[in-house]
Image (cartoon, rainbow, N blue to C red):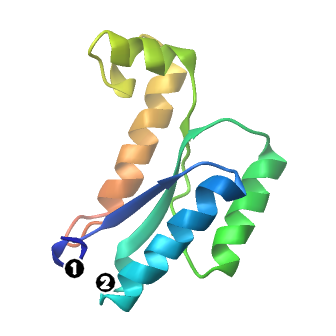
Amino acid sequence: MAQSSDLVLMPTGYSLDDMEPQVEAAFELEDAGVPADRIFFCFCRAKGSEAEDRAARAYLTKARMNVLAPVFPELASIRQGHAEGKAASEVPFPGVQEKAVAVAQAIMNRLPGVKEAA
């Protein structure tokens, strides 16, 4: 399935316990013929400091992994929205909506044939 995909997203948190198995899986995908430029890591349900974000990005960069810039945060409002059947972009908080849309746009920008939007 990954070989036929235009983009493979590897969701991960900031901890090594989250990242290490995903990096290993990404290497296995590459070994199976999935081009590295189609594999992207996305920090999801992430809650941490800027220092933790920088350290996690540095780890993935050292492992030669592509990482999306925006982070899908771990927020109670998103969990509550999901419990109500809403997407993160539908919660009633503009700041949360902006974060969710930024992640979605970053994913769209990586798809072939899609013009990058600001």
Residue 57 is left or right of residue 79, and the answer is right
Residue 63 is left or right of residue 115, and the answer is right
* Residue shown at the point (39%, 26%) measured from the top left: 88
Number of disc labels:
2
Q: Secondary structure at mark 1?
A: helix
Name the one closer to the observer, 89 or 26: 26
- Quick check: marks 2 and 1 in contact, CB under 8 Å? yes
Q: Position of residue 84 (x, y in %)?
A: 31, 9
Instruction: Please name the amino acid that badge 1 sits on.
Output: Gln
Q: Secondary structure at mark 2?
A: loop
- Disc number placed over residue 3 in the picture, else none: 1
* Residue shown at the point (35%, 19%) measured from the top left: 82
Q: Is 33 above or below relative to 27?
A: below
**Residue at mark 2 to residue at mark 1: CA–CA distance:** 5 Å
* Residue shown at the point (47%, 81%) measured from the top left: 27
Instruction: Please name the amino acid that badge 2 sits on.
Output: Val
